[in-house]
Image (tube, rainbow, N blue to C red):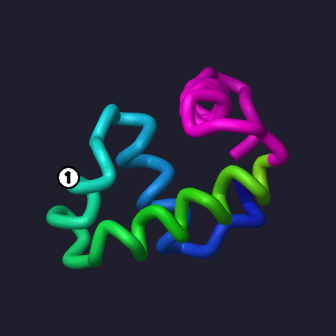
C-alpha cells in the first residue's frame, strides 16, 4: 500500500471501514466521481480486480502492521 497517494490511502481506509462512495465523498469533502476515480486507481495499484478484493487486501495489510514484530 506504500504506492498509494495520501488521498488514495484515505479513501482506501474508509472503504475498508465499510463506507460507501457517497459517505466517503461527504467525509472528505469530495465529489462521488472523485471518490470513484481514487478507488479505480487504488484497485489498479493494488493489482486486484474489485473493490471487495481491495477491501480484503487493505484489512489484511493493516492487521499485519498491528501484529507485534510486524514491519511497519
Identity of the residue drawn at 16% across and 65% down: 26
Residue 44 higher or lower than 13, as above or below: below
Indicate whether residue 51 is drawn in magenta.
Answer: yes
Q: Give the range drawn in magenta.
A: 47-72
Q: Is residue 26 left or right of residue 21?
A: left
- Counting from the top left corner in percent of width and height, residue 49 is at 75, 38
Per the image, label 1 sits on a secondary structure element best described as: helix
Residue indicated by mark 1: 23
Q: Position of residue 42 (x, y in %)?
A: 65, 57
- Residue found at x 22% / y 55%: 22
Q: Where is residue 62 in the image (x, y as percent from the top left)?
A: 57, 35
* The quadrant where residue 63 appears: top right
Instruction: Identify the residue at horizontal 66%, vertical 29% (top origin).
Output: 53
Q: Residue furthest right?
A: 47
| Residue found at the very far front of the displayed protein | 33
Residue 8 is left or right of residue 69, and the answer is left
* Residue 64 position within the rendered picture, expressed as x and y whole percent measured from the top left: 66, 26
* 45 with respect to 22 (left or right): right
User: Does the magenta stretch mainly form a helix, a strand or a loop?
Assistant: helix
Of 48 and 61, nearer the camera is: 48
Q: Who's the residue at 25% across and 65% down the image? A: 25
Q: Where 51 sits versus 5, above or below? A: above
Q: In this view, does 10 lie to the left or right of 62?
A: left
Magenta stretch encompasses residue 8:
no
Amino acid at each position: 500500500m506504500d504506492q498509494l497517494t495520501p488521498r488514495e490511502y484515505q479513501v482506501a481506509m474508509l472503504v475498508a471501514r465499510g463506507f460507501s462512495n457517497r459517505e466517503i465523498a461527504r467525509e472528505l469533502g469530495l465529489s462521488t466521481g472523485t471518490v470513484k476515480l481514487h478507488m479505480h486507481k487504488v484497485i489498479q495499484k493494488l493489482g486486484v480486480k474489485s473493490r471487495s478484493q481491495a477491501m480484503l487486501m487493505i484489512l489484511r495489510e493493516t492487521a499485519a502492521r498491528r501484529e507485534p514484530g510486524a514491519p511497519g
